[in-house]
Image: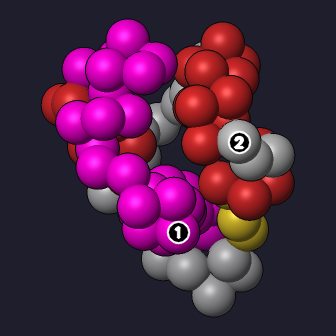
């Protein structure tokens, strides 16, 4: 998919673990891992809001469009 989730990079910049983020936003580590690895098909705005709040960032810092990325895999 040409949409990339930059959660791993943002966590590294914030020196935060996936487990710590999971506790702060009340989302399972498994679900955050799916999002982090780019395997998620969708994200709720409420989830995006919670992640942005916990990481003190904007949605555009977490989501990027990469036109050279792999084709959509349905």
Residue 27, position as x, y percentages in the image: 35, 17
| Residue drawn at x 48%, y 77% as measured from the top left | 70
Q: CA distance from mark 1 to mark 2?
A: 11 Å
> Element under label 1?
helix
Sequence-earlier tag: 1 or 2 = 1
The percent position of residue 73, horizontal first and vertical second, equals: 41, 56
Any mark on residue 13, and which? 1
Say whether residue 23 is magenta: yes
- Circles 1 and 2: CB atoms closer than 8 Å: no
Query: Where residue 45 appears, x then y in whole percent?
Result: 70, 19
From the viewer's side, name the closer residue of 3 and 72.
Answer: 3
Residue depicted at x 68% and y 77%: 66
Q: In the shown orientation, is residue 62 left or right of residue 17?
A: right
> Is the residue 72 above or below the residue 42 in the image?
below
Q: Is residue 59 above or below residue 54?
A: below
User: Which residue sits at x=25%, y=20%?
Assistant: 28
Residue nearest the viewer, comparing 61 with 74: 61
Q: Residues within 10 Å of mark 1 (few under 14, many from 20)?
A: few
- Where residue 34 sits, quadrant-wise, is top left
> Where is residue 21 shown, x and y percent of the image?
38, 34
Q: Is 13 located above or below residue 49 in the figure? A: below
Q: Which residue is tagged 2?
A: 56
Q: Secondary structure at mark 2?
A: loop
- On residue 48, the disc is none
Q: Nearer the viewer, residue 8 or 13?
A: 13
Q: Residue furthest bottom?
A: 68
Magenta highlight range: 2-28
| Crowding at mark 2 (Cα within 10 Å: few <14, some 14-19, many 20+) | few
Residue that appears at 42% across and 21% down: 24
Whether residue 34 appears in this view of the structure is no
Residue 18 location, quadrant: top left
């Amino acid at each position: 998919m040409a949409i990339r989730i930059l959660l791993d990079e943002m966590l590294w910049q914030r020196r935060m673990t996936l487990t710590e983020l999971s506790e702060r936003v009340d989302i399972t580590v498994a679900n955050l891992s799916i999002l982090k690895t780019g395997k998620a098909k969708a994200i709720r705005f409420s989830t995006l809001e919670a992640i942005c709040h916990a990481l003190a960032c904007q949605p555009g810092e977490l989501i990027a469009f990469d036109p050279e990325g792999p084709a959509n895999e349905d």
